[in-house]
Amino acid sequence: ALPNSGGFPGWYPICPPRGSSVHRYYFLVIAQDDEIASAKNVEELANFLKKHAIAYGWSVIVYKR
């Protein structure tokens, strides 16, 4: 599995530093018509999604701790 911005695979919850200003978090959800076991790199994942993405949605979340 590819690492996230926290440096490890999987979900990394949002948590801006205490006392910081408002943070914006961008979420992209992609529906696909097939499963991928794992991707070795971003290019492999992108190639898979080009072939198998059937829908997507996105949202911007504004959050302050």
Image: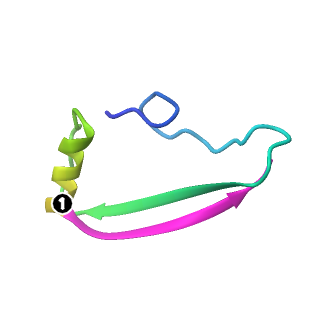
**In the rendered image, which quarter contains the N terminus?**
top left
Decide: few, some or many residues near mark 1? Use Cα within 10 Å; few <14, some 14-19, many ≥20: few
Q: Position of residue 24 (x, y in %)?
A: 64, 56
* Residue 9 vertical position relative to residue 25 in the rendered view, above or below: above
The residue that appears at 53% across and 58% down in the rendered structure is: 26
Q: Position of residue 39 (x, y in %)?
A: 22, 38
Number of numbered callouts drawn: 1
Viewed as shown, does residue 19 lie left or right of 25? Answer: right
* Residue 46 vertical position relative to residue 44 in the rendered view, above or below: below
Identify which residue, 20 or 28, lies in the foreground: 20
The figure's colour scheme reads: rainbow
Q: Position of residue 15 (x, y in %)?
A: 69, 41
Identify which residue, 53 or 21, lies in the foreground: 21
Residue 25 is inside the magenta segment: no
The extreme front residue here reads 21
> Does dot 1 land on a helix, a strand or a loop?
helix
Residue 57 is inside the magenta segment: yes
Three-letter code, disc 1: Lys
Viewed as shown, does residue 35 lie left or right of 30? Answer: left
What secondary structure is the stretch in magenta mostly built from? Answer: strand
The residue that appears at 44% across and 37% down in the rendered structure is: 4
The extreme top residue here reads 7
Viewed as shown, does residue 28 lie left or right of 23? Answer: left
The residue that appears at 52% across and 32% down in the rendered structure is: 6
* Residue 36 vertical position relative to residue 24 in the rendered view, above or below: above
Residue stretch rendered in magenta on the structure: 53-65
Kindly identify which residue carries mark 1: 50
The residue that appears at 24% across and 35% down in the rendered structure is: 41
* Residue 35 vertical position relative to residue 30 in the rendered view, above or below: above
In which image quadrant can residue 20 be found?
Answer: top right
